[in-house]
């Protein structure tokens, strides 16, 4: 890509807009979507009545009826997913689309009603004898759904009686989950008065966070302080929300006789606690090596103290501006070296306008890939600025889309994979493209920039995410004894950061006491301990990438098979079957940690040169 003479504004303006019209024409006013959504509401009521009329016991006469109903449940799951993804896309492309926001309220209701169906299915599964249940899961109609159904039944046996689980689910809509919605509202309303170039503007928290990517340290410092000030004004409310939702969880766990608050996230992630311990053990051993990277980066930045707001500070530089089309070609070219199918799929996704990348007012921030299960398509959302970070983001999201593509013809219960494995394809693609760019570059400053981006990720995944895990764990231990004060939450967060960041942050000024309030992940009621799966996915993808580098193009077939199994096995079984490794042992994690830290030495050499 020889693109040095192209302006950033030209590149941003020429980035593509996605096609949503082929899904439901007319946006939030779509008549076709209205018909689709209304059918969901009607059929959910029909299904709720039907499940109550189905035979209570499995036998040769009732087995087929239940198999048919479970097929319908999976179809409904896909339909609700399609509706949710479409409306989410509408809101992302125009945050001021009030009609789309209203439509999303319907989605919340559908999901709640669907969850009640699952609770009733759990109750039924729990009541069956093993022999009859096995015959049901082996029905041809339920091909590939057996793992999900057996998992659902096993977890149901660990829960309260069905009537209490159903009641808890219903109460959670306006109780437990309301704390999450309250936090989201609070987050969205907060602003900070930011001074730059002689003017003062009220910026959102997202805009302030983006300022911490600036090369100007004063801008980074000011942005950080404004975020701290904003949360200082709401810290008591945030503390109340965090304590309340944790209290709800702990009460529910107590009634289920679940001794550890880690049990639910481990079940959600389909991993054993032994696996998690092995991973964190190797992270703790490897993370101190990052001190050498931070020392070299401090020298490049000309600073004595490395603080929270310095983590995303850029070093190195590149004059290259990447037009979207040329970046897509570069990505696909390097995908093809590994997998012809991956490259062909990505070409199709670009050509069919599955990607929203235009830089224009009114869009949401961030980037994601979402699946439209009924249409068997994906859509990628991002905002193209022309930097290499955008190239990496596009490769990352195309990885998610390819994962969905591999599973597109599977029943929904076989396509639901845990977050621990959800980042495998996306991070794998990022590694492919970043390493290709490094190999191609002859500019020391550009190489420095690329290596820094890779090491920023390593620092975040091995230190920042570990700090979140340590905070969550210590917070829940104290919450069992009663409410945890706002000041104590600050103390727990700083203690977690001091341990996890292994001295890379300045001990006096470098920490972020209010990170517990500012990070929405702590407040997500549908995913407790929403932290360790990121590190797991990052390191697991690195292990898969290692194998691909060793075996070459022949690994592409194995890689596809691995992705295909992610919804039908535990994480341990996926690793054992497709990589031949035992991830409950530390060896795999040691290799993965060493791989991501291998960039430290070349970075230091370039920094000193």
Image (cartoon, rainbow, N blue to C red):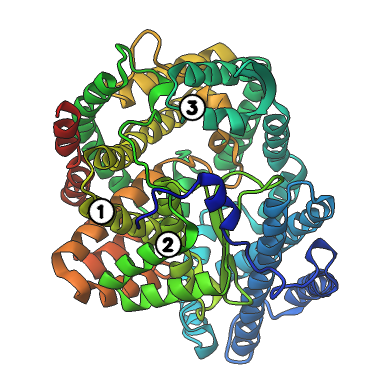
The N terminus lies in quadrant: bottom left
The C terminus lies in quadrant: top left
Up/down of 435 relative to 555, above or below: above
Up/down of 305 relative to 573, above or below: above
Q: Is residue 533 visible?
A: no
CA–CA distance in space, label 3 to label 1: 26 Å
Question: Element type at marker 1?
Answer: helix
Q: Is residue 329 left or right of residue 362?
A: left
- Residue visible at 59% across and 19% down? 196
Question: Element type at marker 3?
Answer: loop
Up/down of 397 relative to 232, above or below: below
* Residue at the spot of label 2: 326
Whether pointer 3 and pointer 1 mark residues with C-beta atoms closer than 8 Å, the reply is: no
Q: Along the polypeptide, which appears first: circle 3 or circle 2? A: 3
- Residue visible at 37% across and 31% down? 314
Whether pointer 3 and pointer 2 mark residues with C-beta atoms closer than 8 Å, the reply is: no
Relative image position of residue 277 (x, y in whole percent):
28, 41
Relative image position of residue 113 (x, y in whole percent):
75, 61
Give the mark toward the camera: 3 or 2: 2
Q: Is residue 352 visible?
A: yes
Q: Along the polypeptide, which appears first: circle 3 or circle 1? A: 3
* Residue at the spot of label 1: 435
Q: Residues within 10 Å of mark 2 (few under 14, many from 20)?
A: some
Q: Residues within 10 Å of mark 3 (few under 14, many from 20)?
A: many
| Picture quadrant of residue 270 | bottom left
Q: Is residue 486 left or right of residue 446?
A: right
Relative image position of residue 73 (x, y in whole percent):
65, 74
CA–CA distance in space, label 3 to label 2: 28 Å
Up/down of 404 relative to 532, above or below: below
Q: Which mark is residue 301?
A: none
* Residue at the spot of label 3: 212
């Amino acid at each position: 890509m020889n693109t040095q003479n192209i302006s950033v504004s030209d590149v941003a303006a020429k980035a593509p807009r996605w096609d949503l019209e082929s899904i439901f024409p007319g946006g939030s006013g779509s008549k076709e979507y209205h018909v689709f959504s209304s059918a969901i509401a009607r059929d959910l009521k029909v299904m709720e009545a039907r499940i109550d009329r189905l035979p209570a016991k499995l036998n040769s006469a009732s087995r087929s009826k239940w198999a048919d109903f479970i097929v319908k449940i999976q179809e409904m799951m896909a339909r609700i997913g399609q509706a949710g993804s479409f409306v989410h896309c509408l809101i992302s492309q125009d945050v001021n689309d009030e009609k789309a926001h209203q439509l999303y309220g319907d989605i919340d209701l559908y999901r709640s009603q669907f969850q009640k169906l699952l609770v009733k299915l759990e109750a039924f599964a729990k009541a069956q004898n093993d022999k009859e249940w096995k015959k049901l899961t082996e029905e041809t109609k339920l091909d590939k759904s057996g793992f999900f159904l057996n998992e659902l039944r096993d977890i149901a046996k660990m829960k309260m009686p069905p009537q209490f689980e159903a009641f808890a689910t219903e109460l959670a809509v306006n109780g437990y989950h309301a704390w999450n919605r309250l936090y989201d509202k609070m987050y969205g309303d907060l602003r900070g008065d930011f001074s730059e170039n002689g003017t003062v503007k009220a910026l959102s928290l997202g805009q302030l966070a983006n300022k911490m990517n600036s090369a100007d340290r004063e801008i980074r410092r000011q942005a950080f302080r404004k975020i701290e000030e904003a949360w200082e004004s709401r810290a008591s409310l945030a503390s109340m929300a965090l304590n309340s939702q944790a209290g709800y969880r702990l009460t529910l766990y107590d009634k289920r006789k679940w001794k550890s608050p880690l049990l639910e996230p481990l079940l959600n992630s389909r991993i054993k606690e032994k696996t998690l311990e092995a991973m964190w053990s190797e992270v703790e051993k490897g993370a101190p090596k990052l001190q050498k990277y931070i020392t070299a980066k401090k020298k490049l930045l000309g600073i004595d103290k490395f603080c929270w707001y310095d983590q995303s500070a850029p070093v190195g530089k590149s004059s290259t501006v990447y037009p979207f089309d040329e970046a897509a070609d570069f990505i696909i070219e390097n995908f093809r070296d590994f997998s012809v199918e991956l490259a062909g799929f990505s070409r199709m996704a670009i050509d069919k306008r599955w990607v929203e990348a235009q830089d224009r007012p009114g869009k949401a921030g961030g980037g994601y890939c979402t699946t439209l299960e009924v249409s068997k398509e994906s859509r990628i959302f991002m905002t193209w600025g022309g930097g290499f970070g955008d190239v990496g983001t596009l490769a990352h999201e195309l990885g998610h889309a390819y994962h969905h593509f591999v599973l597109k013809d599977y029943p929904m219960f076989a396509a639901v994979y845990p977050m621990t494995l959800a980042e495998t394809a996306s991070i794998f693609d990022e590694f492919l493209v970043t390493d290709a760019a490094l190999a191609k570059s002859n500019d020391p400053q550009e190489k420095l920039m690329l290596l820094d981006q890779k090491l920023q990720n390593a620092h975040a995944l091995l230190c920042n995410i570990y700090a979140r895990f340590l905070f969550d764990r210590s917070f829940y231990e104290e919450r069992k004894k009663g409410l945890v004060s706002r000041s104590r939450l600050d103390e727990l967060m700083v203690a977690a950061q001091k341990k996890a960041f292994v001295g890379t942050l300045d001990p006096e000024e470098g920490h972020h006491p209010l990170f517990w309030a500012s990070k929405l992940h702590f407040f997500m009621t549908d995913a407790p301990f929403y932290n360790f799966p990121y590190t797991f996915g990052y390191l697991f993808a690195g292990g898969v990438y290692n194998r691909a580098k060793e075996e070459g193009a022949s690994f592409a077939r194995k890689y596809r098979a691995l992705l295909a199994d992610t919804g039908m096995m535990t994480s341990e079984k996926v690793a054992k079957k497709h990589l031949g490794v035992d991830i409950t042992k530390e060896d795999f994690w040691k290799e993965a940690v060493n791989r991501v830290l291998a960039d430290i030495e070349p970075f230091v050499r370039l920094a000193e040169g």
